[in-house]
């Protein structure tokens, strides 16, 4: 009889393996020595060890499915349970049990991961639906259309949900795209109608502009061309293939008219430039009258200058405000000198000013005495209050005195 720690061979050639449940028959060996029998069944055990090791590695390092892993485990476990090997079979069972735990843990992990991915996909698709529904109301036709096409590609790249949820979200998504397409189609159909109407309006404007191009009624025709331009802008754009041609005809007709008017006005502009030069000289002559020292002489001189001014024709429109402003400034200065002279020579106004000044001076003197009395009595609060009142009366008095000086006293 021969034996080792995990098995033995009896006198009949029967091979046994030792387990936690006692000895189990492995098989019968008649072809050789007992040692060869044990070695043979030990090699079978080593084969199971290698097979379990490979399966453990596959479970840990590959994406082997839980179903396939469990099938492989069951296959090896069946071989272990048949006891056709000599070795620590209980250790192999423990390794297989641990591997089952690993597979179950990975199954749960993958299940949780899939649930997470599904949840993320759901939120992603819901976000796409919300954005699509917002875009469906947009009037940024090109940008919104391009974005909706991009959203379709994003949708296709996301995992599917359960059929009901996926179909419901897709229905909303598809409906938003259809609503946008319908609005865009209606918009461009309306736009085409508007452009056709604009073309008809502009055809009429071009016809009138061409009819006016030979007019010599410069003012009325120029005004009408401005009105036509306003009507042109208000008409909107025609179709692209018509717009440029209509504009070239419209602008060309105006150019003919304004070129003819320009030749006529060039001579007029030269005359107005000479008029401006003469008026600037008169404005300079008038400015020499300031400041007014002799009112009567200044008034007479200005009247003479103004008569010569009126005899000169028009000046360029853009230069008119400045040169006329210079003359008006001199005229105002002479008027102010006249008003000052009138005030100086008006006895009634001077008397009123003198009376007011006297009343204010009396009030100031009275307040000063009251302040002094309050200070002397130690009543500083009353004195301060009266002092503030005094400041206001003194300011009025100073103004009145200044006015009185204008009357010469």
Image: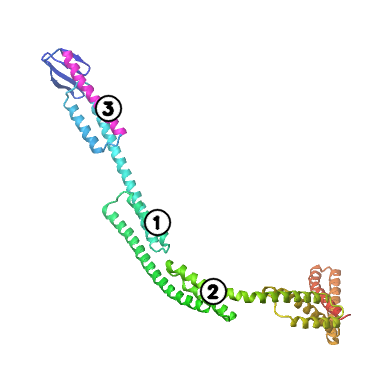
Report the mark closest to the observer, 1 or 2.
Answer: 2
Quarter of the image with the N terminus is top left
The CA distance from mark 3 to mark 1 is 53 Å
Task: Look at the image and say whether residue 148 sits in the magenta stretch.
Answer: no
Q: Quadrant of residue 342?
A: bottom right
Towards the viewer: 302 or 57: 302
State left or right for residue 107 relative to residue 35: right
Residue 7's place in the image compared with 357, above or below, is: above
Residue 387 on image: x %, y %: 81, 71
Towards the viewer: 142 or 150: 142
**Kind of element beneath mark 1:** helix
Please give the name of the residue rendered at 31% of the width and 45% of the height, measured from the top-left corner: 114
- Our reading of the magenta stretch's main secondary structure is helix
Which region is colored magenta? 34-61
Residue 215's place in the image compared with 14, above or below, is: below
Residue 58 on image: x %, y %: 28, 32
- Residue under circle 2? 254
Counting labels gives 3
- Residue under circle 1? 147
The disc placed on residue 53 is: 3
Report the mark closest to the observer, 3 or 1.
Answer: 1
Task: Look at the image and say whether residue 45 sits in the magenta stretch.
Answer: yes
The CA distance from mark 3 to mark 2 is 96 Å
């Amino acid at each position: 009889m021969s034996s080792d720690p995990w098995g033995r061979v009896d006198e009949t050639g029967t091979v046994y393996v030792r387990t936690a449940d006692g000895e189990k028959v492995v098989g019968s060996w008649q072809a050789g020595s007992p040692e060869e029998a044990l070695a043979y069944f030990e090699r079978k055990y080593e084969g199971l060890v290698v097979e379990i090791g490979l399966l453990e590695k596959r479970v840990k390092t590959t994406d082997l499915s839980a179903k396939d892993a469990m099938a492989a485990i069951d296959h090896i476990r069946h071989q272990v349970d048949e006891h056709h090997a000599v070795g620590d079979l209980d250790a192999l069972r423990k390794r297989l049990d641990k591997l089952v735990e690993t597979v179950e843990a990975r199954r749960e992990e993958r299940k949780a991961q899939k649930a997470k991915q599904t949840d993320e996909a759901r939120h992603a698709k819901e976000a796409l639906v919300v954005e699509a529904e917002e875009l469906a109301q947009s009037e940024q036709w090109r940008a919104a259309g391009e974005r909706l096409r991009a959203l379709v590609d994003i949708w296709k790249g996301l995992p599917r949900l359960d059929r009901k949820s996926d179909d419901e979200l897709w229905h909303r998504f598809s409906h938003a795209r259809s609503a946008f397409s319908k609005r865009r189609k209606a918009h461009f159909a309306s736009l085409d109608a508007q452009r056709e109407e604009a073309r008809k309006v502009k055809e009429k404007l071009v016809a009138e502009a061409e009819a006016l191009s030979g007019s010599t009624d410069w003012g009325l025709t120029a005004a009408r061309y401005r009105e036509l331009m306003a009507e042109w802008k208000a008409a909107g754009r025609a179709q692209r293939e018509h717009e440029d041609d209509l504009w070239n005809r419209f602008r060309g007709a105006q150019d003919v008219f304004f070129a003819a008017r320009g030749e006529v006005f060039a001579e007029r502009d030269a005359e107005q430039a000479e008029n401006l030069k003469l008026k600037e000289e008169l404005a300079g002559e008038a400015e020499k009258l300031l400041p007014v020292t002799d009112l009567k002489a200044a008034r007479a001189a200005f009247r003479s200058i103004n008569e010569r001014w009126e005899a000169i024709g028009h000046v360029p429109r853009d230069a008119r405000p400045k040169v006329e402003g210079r003359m008006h400034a001199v005229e105002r200065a002479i008027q102010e000198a006249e008003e000052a002279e009138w005030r100086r020579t008006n006895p009634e106004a001077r008397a009123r000013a003198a009376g007011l000044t006297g009343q204010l001076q009396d009030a100031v003197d009275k307040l000063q005495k009251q302040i002094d009395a309050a200070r002397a009595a130690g009543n500083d609060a009353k004195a301060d209050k009266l002092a503030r009142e005094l400041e206001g009366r003194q300011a009025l008095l100073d103004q009145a005195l200044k006015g009185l000086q204008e009357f010469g006293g």
